[in-house]
Amino acid sequence: MAATNRLKIATIPGDGIGREVVPEGMRVLEAAGRRFNIAFQFDEVDWSCERYKKLGSMMPADGLEQFRNHDAVFLGAVGWPEVPDHVSLWGLLIPIRREYQQYANVRPVRLLKGITSPLAGRGPEDIDFYVVRENVEGEYSEVGGRVYRGTEDEVAIQEAVFTRRGTDRILRYAFELARTRPRRHVTSATKSNGIIHSMPFWDERFAAIKAEYPDIATSQYHIDILTAHFVQHPDWFDVVVGSNLFGDILSDLGPAVAGSIGIAPSGNINPERTFPSMFEPVHGSAPDIAGKGIANPIGQIWSAAMMLEHLGHSDAAARIIEAIETVIADPASRTRDMGGRANTAECGRAIAEVVAG
Ligand code: ATP
Ligand code: MG
Protein backbone atom coordinates (compact mmCIF):
# COMPACT_ATOMS: atom_id res chain seq x y z
CA MET A 1 0.00 0.00 0.00
CA ALA A 2 1.30 3.46 -0.90
CA ALA A 3 1.97 5.58 2.16
CA THR A 4 -0.23 8.65 2.47
CA ASN A 5 1.44 11.59 4.09
CA ARG A 6 -1.73 12.88 5.67
CA LEU A 7 -3.40 10.71 8.29
CA LYS A 8 -6.79 11.28 9.91
CA ILE A 9 -6.82 9.60 13.28
CA ALA A 10 -9.85 9.28 15.57
CA THR A 11 -8.58 9.56 19.12
CA ILE A 12 -10.46 8.07 22.08
CA PRO A 13 -8.52 8.57 25.35
CA GLY A 14 -11.40 6.92 27.29
CA ASP A 15 -11.06 6.42 31.04
CA GLY A 16 -8.46 6.35 33.78
CA ILE A 17 -4.87 6.10 32.60
CA GLY A 18 -6.11 6.05 28.98
CA ARG A 19 -6.28 9.83 29.29
CA GLU A 20 -2.71 9.96 30.55
CA VAL A 21 -1.07 7.66 28.04
CA VAL A 22 -2.90 8.69 24.84
CA PRO A 23 -1.30 12.19 24.88
CA GLU A 24 2.12 10.50 25.09
CA GLY A 25 1.24 8.31 22.12
CA MET A 26 0.24 11.46 20.21
CA ARG A 27 3.44 13.23 21.24
CA VAL A 28 5.52 10.39 19.82
CA LEU A 29 3.40 10.25 16.65
CA GLU A 30 3.95 13.99 16.13
CA ALA A 31 7.69 13.50 16.55
CA ALA A 32 7.67 10.64 14.02
CA GLY A 33 5.54 12.80 11.73
CA ARG A 34 8.10 15.60 11.73
CA ARG A 35 10.88 13.21 10.91
CA PHE A 36 9.09 11.13 8.27
CA ASN A 37 6.94 13.86 6.76
CA ILE A 38 3.54 12.65 7.96
CA ALA A 39 0.86 15.19 8.92
CA PHE A 40 -1.58 13.98 11.57
CA GLN A 41 -5.09 15.21 12.03
CA PHE A 42 -6.28 13.99 15.45
CA ASP A 43 -10.05 14.11 15.97
CA GLU A 44 -10.59 13.50 19.66
CA VAL A 45 -13.86 12.40 21.31
CA ASP A 46 -14.90 11.95 24.95
CA TRP A 47 -16.45 8.47 24.51
CA SER A 48 -15.99 6.84 27.91
CA CYS A 49 -17.57 5.67 31.17
CA GLU A 50 -17.28 9.30 32.28
CA ARG A 51 -19.58 10.25 29.39
CA TYR A 52 -21.90 7.36 30.27
CA LYS A 53 -22.28 8.67 33.81
CA LYS A 54 -23.14 12.18 32.55
CA LEU A 55 -25.20 11.41 29.45
CA GLY A 56 -26.27 7.77 29.75
CA SER A 57 -24.33 6.41 26.78
CA MET A 58 -20.70 5.57 26.08
CA MET A 59 -20.85 7.29 22.70
CA PRO A 60 -23.40 9.15 20.56
CA ALA A 61 -25.89 7.03 18.59
CA ASP A 62 -24.32 8.08 15.28
CA GLY A 63 -20.77 7.94 16.67
CA LEU A 64 -19.39 5.37 14.28
CA GLU A 65 -20.60 7.35 11.26
CA GLN A 66 -18.14 10.10 12.17
CA PHE A 67 -15.03 7.95 11.71
CA ARG A 68 -16.00 5.64 8.89
CA ASN A 69 -13.53 7.33 6.55
CA HIS A 70 -10.73 7.94 9.02
CA ASP A 71 -7.45 6.11 8.61
CA ALA A 72 -7.46 4.55 12.09
CA VAL A 73 -8.81 4.75 15.62
CA PHE A 74 -6.31 5.33 18.44
CA LEU A 75 -7.83 4.19 21.73
CA GLY A 76 -6.56 4.46 25.32
CA ALA A 77 -8.68 2.38 27.67
CA VAL A 78 -12.34 2.22 28.64
CA GLY A 79 -13.83 0.89 31.87
CA TRP A 80 -14.46 2.23 35.32
CA PRO A 81 -15.37 0.55 38.62
CA GLU A 82 -18.94 1.92 39.04
CA VAL A 83 -19.85 1.11 35.44
CA PRO A 84 -20.51 -2.59 34.71
CA ASP A 85 -18.10 -4.15 32.20
CA HIS A 86 -20.91 -5.11 29.82
CA VAL A 87 -21.82 -1.41 29.49
CA SER A 88 -18.33 -0.34 28.46
CA LEU A 89 -17.81 -3.43 26.30
CA TRP A 90 -21.17 -3.52 24.52
CA GLY A 91 -21.54 0.27 24.50
CA LEU A 92 -18.22 1.01 22.81
CA LEU A 93 -15.61 -1.65 22.10
CA ILE A 94 -17.79 -4.35 20.60
CA PRO A 95 -19.80 -1.97 18.36
CA ILE A 96 -16.55 -0.52 16.98
CA ARG A 97 -15.02 -3.96 16.34
CA ARG A 98 -18.18 -5.27 14.67
CA GLU A 99 -19.22 -2.19 12.71
CA TYR A 100 -15.72 -1.68 11.35
CA GLN A 101 -15.28 -5.45 10.78
CA GLN A 102 -12.10 -5.60 12.81
CA TYR A 103 -12.13 -9.37 12.84
CA ALA A 104 -8.43 -9.88 13.58
CA ASN A 105 -7.13 -9.01 17.02
CA VAL A 106 -3.38 -8.92 16.76
CA ARG A 107 -0.83 -8.75 19.56
CA PRO A 108 2.90 -8.80 19.03
CA VAL A 109 4.64 -10.74 21.78
CA ARG A 110 8.17 -9.51 21.71
CA LEU A 111 10.67 -9.26 24.50
CA LEU A 112 12.21 -5.83 24.03
CA LYS A 113 15.86 -5.24 24.82
CA GLY A 114 16.11 -4.02 28.39
CA ILE A 115 13.04 -5.91 29.68
CA THR A 116 13.40 -8.97 31.89
CA SER A 117 11.01 -11.79 31.04
CA PRO A 118 9.44 -13.66 33.96
CA LEU A 119 10.73 -16.77 32.14
CA ALA A 120 14.17 -17.31 33.61
CA GLY A 121 17.03 -17.23 31.15
CA ARG A 122 14.97 -16.05 28.16
CA GLY A 123 16.21 -13.16 26.04
CA PRO A 124 14.85 -11.12 23.09
CA GLU A 125 15.97 -13.82 20.61
CA ASP A 126 13.64 -16.36 22.29
CA ILE A 127 10.40 -14.35 22.43
CA ASP A 128 9.25 -12.79 19.18
CA PHE A 129 5.89 -13.90 17.83
CA TYR A 130 2.34 -12.74 17.13
CA VAL A 131 -0.96 -13.91 18.58
CA VAL A 132 -3.85 -13.56 16.12
CA ARG A 133 -7.28 -13.89 17.72
CA GLU A 134 -10.59 -14.20 15.87
CA ASN A 135 -12.40 -11.12 17.12
CA VAL A 136 -16.09 -11.29 16.14
CA GLU A 137 -17.56 -14.82 16.29
CA GLY A 138 -16.77 -18.25 17.78
CA GLU A 139 -17.39 -18.96 21.44
CA TYR A 140 -18.44 -15.42 22.37
CA SER A 141 -21.85 -15.65 20.75
CA GLU A 142 -25.24 -14.55 21.96
CA VAL A 143 -26.80 -17.89 21.05
CA GLY A 144 -27.94 -19.93 24.02
CA GLY A 145 -30.00 -19.51 27.12
CA ARG A 146 -31.03 -20.86 30.49
CA VAL A 147 -33.96 -23.00 31.52
CA TYR A 148 -35.42 -24.17 34.84
CA ARG A 149 -33.77 -21.24 36.57
CA GLY A 150 -33.31 -21.60 40.29
CA THR A 151 -34.29 -25.29 40.33
CA GLU A 152 -32.19 -28.39 40.76
CA ASP A 153 -32.73 -29.02 37.02
CA GLU A 154 -31.28 -25.69 35.94
CA VAL A 155 -29.41 -25.77 32.60
CA ALA A 156 -27.27 -23.15 30.85
CA ILE A 157 -26.44 -23.54 27.17
CA GLN A 158 -23.89 -21.46 25.27
CA GLU A 159 -23.42 -22.07 21.57
CA ALA A 160 -20.22 -21.34 19.68
CA VAL A 161 -20.70 -20.10 16.12
CA PHE A 162 -17.96 -20.81 13.57
CA THR A 163 -18.74 -19.75 10.02
CA ARG A 164 -16.65 -20.90 7.10
CA ARG A 165 -16.24 -17.31 5.94
CA GLY A 166 -15.21 -16.12 9.41
CA THR A 167 -12.84 -19.03 10.00
CA ASP A 168 -11.17 -18.86 6.60
CA ARG A 169 -10.53 -15.13 6.75
CA ILE A 170 -8.82 -15.21 10.16
CA LEU A 171 -6.69 -18.20 9.11
CA ARG A 172 -5.74 -16.44 5.87
CA TYR A 173 -4.81 -13.33 7.84
CA ALA A 174 -2.43 -15.44 9.96
CA PHE A 175 -0.81 -17.00 6.88
CA GLU A 176 -0.43 -13.60 5.21
CA LEU A 177 1.19 -12.22 8.38
CA ALA A 178 3.58 -15.20 8.46
CA ARG A 179 4.64 -14.33 4.91
CA THR A 180 5.99 -11.00 6.17
CA ARG A 181 8.15 -12.75 8.78
CA PRO A 182 11.51 -14.49 8.29
CA ARG A 183 10.45 -17.79 9.88
CA ARG A 184 7.18 -18.15 7.95
CA HIS A 185 5.47 -20.38 10.45
CA VAL A 186 1.86 -20.58 11.65
CA THR A 187 0.65 -22.46 14.74
CA SER A 188 -3.06 -23.24 15.13
CA ALA A 189 -4.71 -23.52 18.56
CA THR A 190 -7.29 -26.30 18.60
CA LYS A 191 -9.15 -28.65 20.94
CA SER A 192 -10.67 -31.13 18.54
CA ASN A 193 -10.29 -33.98 21.02
CA GLY A 194 -12.82 -32.40 23.40
CA ILE A 195 -14.90 -30.01 21.31
CA ILE A 196 -16.20 -32.33 18.64
CA HIS A 197 -18.06 -30.09 16.17
CA SER A 198 -16.52 -26.65 15.92
CA MET A 199 -12.87 -27.61 16.47
CA PRO A 200 -12.66 -30.41 13.87
CA PHE A 201 -14.23 -27.84 11.51
CA TRP A 202 -11.51 -25.32 12.49
CA ASP A 203 -8.84 -28.00 11.85
CA GLU A 204 -10.33 -28.83 8.45
CA ARG A 205 -10.32 -25.17 7.42
CA PHE A 206 -6.76 -24.82 8.73
CA ALA A 207 -5.69 -27.72 6.47
CA ALA A 208 -7.54 -26.19 3.51
CA ILE A 209 -6.01 -22.71 3.92
CA LYS A 210 -2.56 -24.20 4.61
CA ALA A 211 -2.75 -25.81 1.16
CA GLU A 212 -2.93 -22.29 -0.33
CA TYR A 213 0.36 -21.39 1.37
CA PRO A 214 2.92 -24.09 0.53
CA ASP A 215 5.72 -21.70 1.52
CA ILE A 216 4.53 -21.51 5.15
CA ALA A 217 5.39 -24.20 7.74
CA THR A 218 2.70 -25.09 10.27
CA SER A 219 2.07 -26.80 13.57
CA GLN A 220 -1.04 -27.33 15.64
CA TYR A 221 -1.59 -27.98 19.33
CA HIS A 222 -4.48 -28.43 21.68
CA ILE A 223 -5.00 -25.27 23.68
CA ASP A 224 -4.06 -26.88 27.01
CA ILE A 225 -0.59 -28.02 25.97
CA LEU A 226 -0.14 -24.90 23.87
CA THR A 227 -0.34 -22.69 26.96
CA ALA A 228 2.37 -24.83 28.55
CA HIS A 229 4.54 -24.45 25.44
CA PHE A 230 4.18 -20.65 25.59
CA VAL A 231 5.92 -20.79 28.94
CA GLN A 232 8.40 -23.60 28.27
CA HIS A 233 9.21 -23.04 24.58
CA PRO A 234 8.34 -19.47 23.55
CA ASP A 235 11.03 -19.78 20.87
CA TRP A 236 8.88 -22.29 18.94
CA PHE A 237 6.37 -19.66 17.85
CA ASP A 238 6.12 -17.18 15.01
CA VAL A 239 2.40 -16.54 14.27
CA VAL A 240 -0.15 -18.26 16.52
CA VAL A 241 -3.81 -18.21 15.44
CA GLY A 242 -6.80 -19.07 17.62
CA SER A 243 -10.56 -18.75 17.91
CA ASN A 244 -12.11 -15.92 19.92
CA LEU A 245 -11.83 -17.78 23.26
CA PHE A 246 -8.50 -19.52 22.71
CA GLY A 247 -7.05 -16.37 21.19
CA ASP A 248 -8.28 -14.37 24.18
CA ILE A 249 -6.40 -16.66 26.56
CA LEU A 250 -3.23 -16.73 24.47
CA SER A 251 -3.25 -12.99 23.91
CA ASP A 252 -3.06 -12.35 27.65
CA LEU A 253 -0.54 -15.11 28.29
CA GLY A 254 1.71 -13.92 25.45
CA PRO A 255 2.30 -10.36 26.72
CA ALA A 256 2.78 -11.77 30.23
CA VAL A 257 5.80 -13.81 29.08
CA ALA A 258 7.16 -10.69 27.35
CA GLY A 259 7.26 -8.60 30.52
CA SER A 260 5.11 -5.81 31.93
CA ILE A 261 1.41 -5.36 31.13
CA GLY A 262 2.20 -1.67 30.74
CA ILE A 263 4.15 -2.13 27.50
CA ALA A 264 2.01 -4.54 25.46
CA PRO A 265 0.24 -3.19 22.33
CA SER A 266 -2.64 -4.51 20.24
CA GLY A 267 -4.43 -3.94 16.97
CA ASN A 268 -8.05 -4.65 16.04
CA ILE A 269 -7.55 -5.05 12.33
CA ASN A 270 -9.87 -4.76 9.35
CA PRO A 271 -7.53 -6.45 6.86
CA GLU A 272 -9.53 -5.41 3.78
CA ARG A 273 -9.19 -1.76 4.83
CA THR A 274 -12.86 -1.12 4.12
CA PHE A 275 -13.05 0.49 7.59
CA PRO A 276 -10.53 1.94 10.01
CA SER A 277 -8.59 -0.45 12.25
CA MET A 278 -8.19 0.34 15.94
CA PHE A 279 -5.00 0.35 18.01
CA GLU A 280 -4.91 0.22 21.82
CA PRO A 281 -2.67 -0.96 24.63
CA VAL A 282 -3.43 -4.36 26.15
CA HIS A 283 -3.86 -2.89 29.62
CA GLY A 284 -7.07 -1.38 30.98
CA SER A 285 -7.89 1.92 32.65
CA ALA A 286 -5.98 0.94 35.85
CA PRO A 287 -8.14 2.82 38.39
CA ASP A 288 -5.63 2.04 41.15
CA ILE A 289 -2.99 4.33 39.61
CA ALA A 290 -5.17 6.68 37.53
CA GLY A 291 -4.70 10.42 38.04
CA LYS A 292 -1.20 10.07 39.48
CA GLY A 293 0.75 10.54 36.28
CA ILE A 294 2.78 7.38 36.87
CA ALA A 295 1.32 5.03 34.24
CA ASN A 296 3.69 3.46 31.76
CA PRO A 297 2.97 5.02 28.33
CA ILE A 298 4.90 2.40 26.33
CA GLY A 299 1.89 0.14 25.57
CA GLN A 300 0.19 3.15 24.01
CA ILE A 301 3.32 4.27 22.18
CA TRP A 302 3.99 0.79 20.81
CA SER A 303 0.32 0.70 19.66
CA ALA A 304 1.05 3.95 17.78
CA ALA A 305 3.95 2.16 16.06
CA MET A 306 1.63 -0.73 15.08
CA MET A 307 -0.81 1.83 13.68
CA LEU A 308 1.90 3.43 11.53
CA GLU A 309 3.04 0.01 10.31
CA HIS A 310 -0.56 -0.83 9.33
CA LEU A 311 -0.85 2.48 7.47
CA GLY A 312 2.26 1.78 5.42
CA HIS A 313 4.82 3.79 7.40
CA SER A 314 7.15 0.96 8.37
CA ASP A 315 10.19 3.23 8.74
CA ALA A 316 8.45 5.46 11.24
CA ALA A 317 7.13 2.40 13.11
CA ALA A 318 10.60 0.82 13.34
CA ARG A 319 12.03 4.12 14.54
CA ILE A 320 9.52 4.23 17.41
CA ILE A 321 10.33 0.67 18.52
CA GLU A 322 14.06 1.45 18.46
CA ALA A 323 13.43 4.60 20.49
CA ILE A 324 11.47 2.62 23.09
CA GLU A 325 14.39 0.18 23.39
CA THR A 326 16.89 3.02 23.68
CA VAL A 327 14.91 4.75 26.41
CA ILE A 328 14.22 1.69 28.55
CA ALA A 329 17.89 0.74 28.45
CA ASP A 330 18.31 3.66 30.90
CA PRO A 331 16.64 2.73 34.20
CA ALA A 332 16.18 6.44 35.04
CA SER A 333 13.74 6.83 32.11
CA ARG A 334 11.60 3.86 33.12
CA THR A 335 8.29 4.21 34.94
CA ARG A 336 7.76 2.61 38.36
CA ASP A 337 6.16 -0.60 37.10
CA MET A 338 9.51 -1.24 35.35
CA GLY A 339 11.56 -0.39 38.39
CA GLY A 340 12.32 3.24 37.46
CA ARG A 341 11.29 6.63 38.79
CA ALA A 342 10.19 8.50 35.66
CA ASN A 343 6.60 9.68 35.40
CA THR A 344 4.35 9.15 32.38
CA ALA A 345 5.26 12.41 30.63
CA GLU A 346 9.00 12.06 31.27
CA CYS A 347 9.03 8.60 29.73
CA GLY A 348 6.91 9.76 26.75
CA ARG A 349 9.08 12.85 26.17
CA ALA A 350 12.27 10.79 26.29
CA ILE A 351 10.92 8.46 23.59
CA ALA A 352 9.69 11.38 21.46
CA GLU A 353 13.15 12.99 21.67
CA VAL A 354 14.89 9.85 20.45
CA VAL A 355 12.37 9.51 17.62
CA ALA A 356 12.98 13.13 16.58
CA GLY A 357 16.75 12.41 16.66
P1 ATP B 1 -9.42 -4.47 31.95
O1 ATP B 1 -10.46 -5.14 32.77
O2 ATP B 1 -9.83 -3.15 31.38
O3 ATP B 1 -8.73 -5.35 30.97
P2 ATP B 1 -7.93 -4.73 34.32
O4 ATP B 1 -8.72 -4.05 35.38
O5 ATP B 1 -8.02 -6.19 34.22
O6 ATP B 1 -8.27 -4.07 32.94
P3 ATP B 1 -5.61 -3.09 34.17
O7 ATP B 1 -6.43 -1.87 34.18
O8 ATP B 1 -4.82 -3.36 32.96
O9 ATP B 1 -6.43 -4.40 34.45
O10 ATP B 1 -4.67 -3.12 35.44
C1 ATP B 1 -4.09 -4.31 35.95
C2 ATP B 1 -2.93 -3.93 36.87
O11 ATP B 1 -1.82 -3.51 36.05
C3 ATP B 1 -3.23 -2.75 37.78
O12 ATP B 1 -2.63 -2.94 39.04
C4 ATP B 1 -2.62 -1.59 37.08
O13 ATP B 1 -2.22 -0.56 37.94
C5 ATP B 1 -1.42 -2.19 36.35
N1 ATP B 1 -1.21 -1.47 35.08
C6 ATP B 1 -1.98 -1.56 33.97
N2 ATP B 1 -1.52 -0.75 33.01
C7 ATP B 1 -0.45 -0.12 33.51
C8 ATP B 1 0.45 0.86 32.99
N3 ATP B 1 0.33 1.37 31.75
N4 ATP B 1 1.47 1.30 33.79
C9 ATP B 1 1.61 0.80 35.01
N5 ATP B 1 0.80 -0.12 35.56
C10 ATP B 1 -0.23 -0.58 34.83
MG1 MG C 1 -10.93 -4.13 34.73
Image (cartoon, helix red, strand yellow):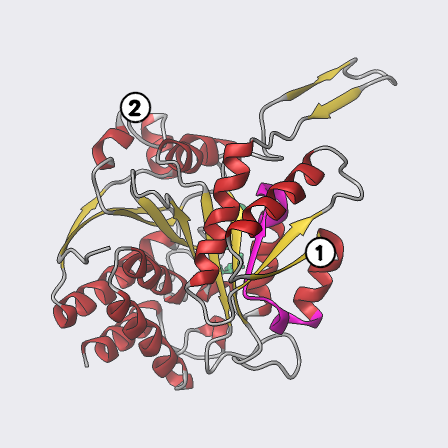
Part of the protein shown in magenta? 232-247
Residue 282 visible in rendering: no
Front-lying residue, 109 or 62: 109
Which is more foreground, mark 1 or mark 2?
Answer: 1
Residue type at numbered disc 2: Ala
- Residue furthest out toward the top: 148
- Residue furthest out toward the right: 152
Across and down, in percent, residue 81 comes to 50, 42
Q: Going by the image, does 193 lie left or right of 300?
A: right
Residue found at x 71% / y 71%: 232
Q: Secondary structure at mark 2?
A: loop
The residue singled out by tag 1 in the image is 221
Q: Going by the image, does 112 lie left or right of 355?
A: right
- The answer to which image quadrant residue 349 occupies is bottom left
Residue found at x 62% / y 22%: 143
Name above or below for residue 61 compared with residue 75.
above
Magenta span has 309? Answer: no
Quadrant of the image for the N terminus? Answer: bottom left
Across and down, in percent, residue 288 comes to 49, 56
Residue found at x 25% / y 59%: 312
Residue 355 visible in rendering: yes
Q: Going by the image, does 7 lie left or right of 303?
A: left
Residue found at x 24% / y 73%: 352
Residue type at numbered disc 1: Tyr
The residue singled out by tag 2 in the image is 61
Q: How many marks?
A: 2
Across and down, in percent, residue 332 comes to 38, 84
Front-lying residue, 105 or 89: 105
Across and down, in percent, residue 31 comes to 18, 69
Crowdedness of circle 2 by 10 Å Cα count: few (<14), some, many (20+)? few
| Structural distance between the alpha carbons of marks 1 and 2 | 43 Å
